[in-house]
Amino acid sequence: MMDWLREHPEVKTIRVAAADLNGVARGKRIPARFADKLLTEGTKFPYSVLNMDIWGEDVENSPLVFEAGDPDGLLMPTERGFMPMPWLDAPTGLLPLWMFHPDGRPYDGDPRQALARVVERYKAAGLTAVVATELEFFLIDDSKAGLLQVPPSPRSGKRRTGAETLSLRALDAFDKFFTDLYDSCEAMDIPADTAISEAAPGQFEINLMHQPDPLKAADDAWLFKLLVKGLARRYGFAGSFMAKPYDLFNGNGMHMHFSVLDQNGDNIFDDGTDAGSERLRHAVAGCLRAMPGSTLLFAPHENSYDRLVPNAHAPTGIGWAYENRTSAIRIPSSGPKARRIEHRTAGGDVNPYLTTAAILGAALNGLQDRLDCPPPISGNAYDHALDQLPASWGAAIDAFERCPEIKRILPQHLIDNLVMTKRQELHYMAELSDEETVELYLDTV
């Protein structure tokens, strides 16, 4: 890992960071000359740092704080290694971390460790999940208090107000930003693919390429969100993955595509037909069964539930379909060998590690239990009498806490910590105005 620093002698400082339960990067600034010690010995944070609320405050009555004496966990580098932080003025390196106990055991409250646990379940079953994400975000001018609007184009200085779905003009208006973004993705080894303008003014989507390593795919999504938010600020506007910044326009989603390979590298969802295999339907059934309890991970914040409303291109009913974007789970049209599941429920404001763990864990539950799948729907999913996702944040917290499928997927310690964190946020969010809510979520999530 030191090779990168040796190749970049201009880097004098580094940031070390891990993702907390909300996906917020928590870390330290360290002089680059101490990197050798960091790689061999790691660094320490209190366990409670990964379990703070969205304001970065301790969770009241958390057993990690006063009851235990707020002890330290050990943070070690992930396999990702060093990378640049192109949004900062001075050349700076970033080293992603994850948490262990001092004796080397993985810390169950770390979201990345939770996903690693799911990946190990796949390995034990002789399977490999192949994952890709599609991330939607807004570019927003928030320079005037209480007013959100599309920023002026860095290219023309003009401010477009139309949605311009799949418009090249909308992309071209921010060509300088997107050129810088793609160059930065290349430097950070984030496999950014297609960019499109989306269905709301100033909204865009970038696809990240499939990875046969779910940890790499979740890393890519987490780092991409850091990059977009940081780089946008260099251009004088916000890059926001907030689920629903505008009342009148569609929100941001994070759609996840995945297939599963067996030990021979064959796609187990492929049976040579357009319908896909029985094992595909087992996986779909597992995802559907876990969906009510998983909703808190797909919609983790108060604002998330403004996105989950009927006829707004975000699913509210628990169903699946072939080539149908109104359904929570879509089987895209493709050649049989590329047969895959697209899970469309999550918002852009999620923690990618927890979302990926929940989806893949639910699919594996379905595969191992050989769950029967209900018939696919056709037509507008909002017109079907489907079971519904929890309609409020509080209901989603309750469903998550008692869900047996979630208990098979995530460590109980993480479940307990997340429930405490979200109940504290739910309590304090009631005191905020709409303007304060937007200010809180616009950059943090």
Image (cartoon, rainbow, N blue to C red):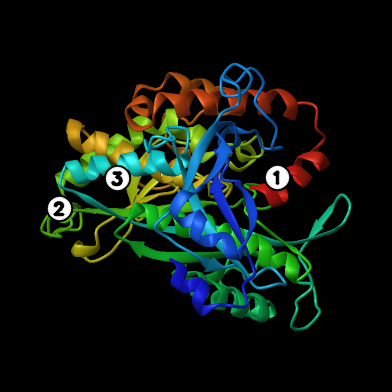
Question: Which three-letter amino acid code belongs to the residue tagged 1?
Answer: Tyr
Q: In which quarter of the image is residue 32?
A: bottom right
Number of residues whose C-alpha sits closer than 10 Å to that of mark 3, classed few (under 14), some (14–19) or many (20 or more): many
Compare residues 402 and 25 and report the one nearer the observer.
25
Compare residues 118 and 369 and report the one nearer the observer.
118
Which quarter of the image is occupied by the N terminus?
Answer: bottom left
Question: Which three-letter amino acid code belongs to the residue tagged 3?
Answer: Val
Compare residues 389 and 437 and report the one nearer the observer.
437
Question: Which three-letter amino acid code belongs to the residue tagged 2?
Answer: Asp
The nearer-to-camera label among 3 and 2 is 3
Secondary element type, mark 3: helix
First of labels 2, 1 by sequence position = 2
Q: How many labels does the image show?
A: 3
**Is 279 positioned to the left or the right of 205 in the image?**
left
First of labels 3, 1 by sequence position = 3
Point 54% across, 51% down: residue: 253
| Residue 273, placed above or below residue 184 | above
First of labels 3, 2 by sequence position = 3
| Pointer 1 residue | 441
**Is 116 positioned to the left or the right of 277 in the image?**
right
- Residue 206 x %, y %: 52, 66
Report, in whole angstroms, how far the alpha carbon at label 3 lies from the one at label 2.
14 Å
Number of residues whose C-alpha sits closer than 10 Å to that of mark 1, classed few (under 14), some (14–19) or many (20 or more): many
Report, in whole angstroms, how far the alpha carbon at label 3 lies from the one at label 1.
30 Å
| Pointer 3 residue | 119
- Residue 62 x %, y %: 60, 21
Compare residues 388 and 269 and report the one nearer the observer.
269
**Is 438 positioned to the left or the right of 120 in the image?**
right
| Pointer 2 residue | 262
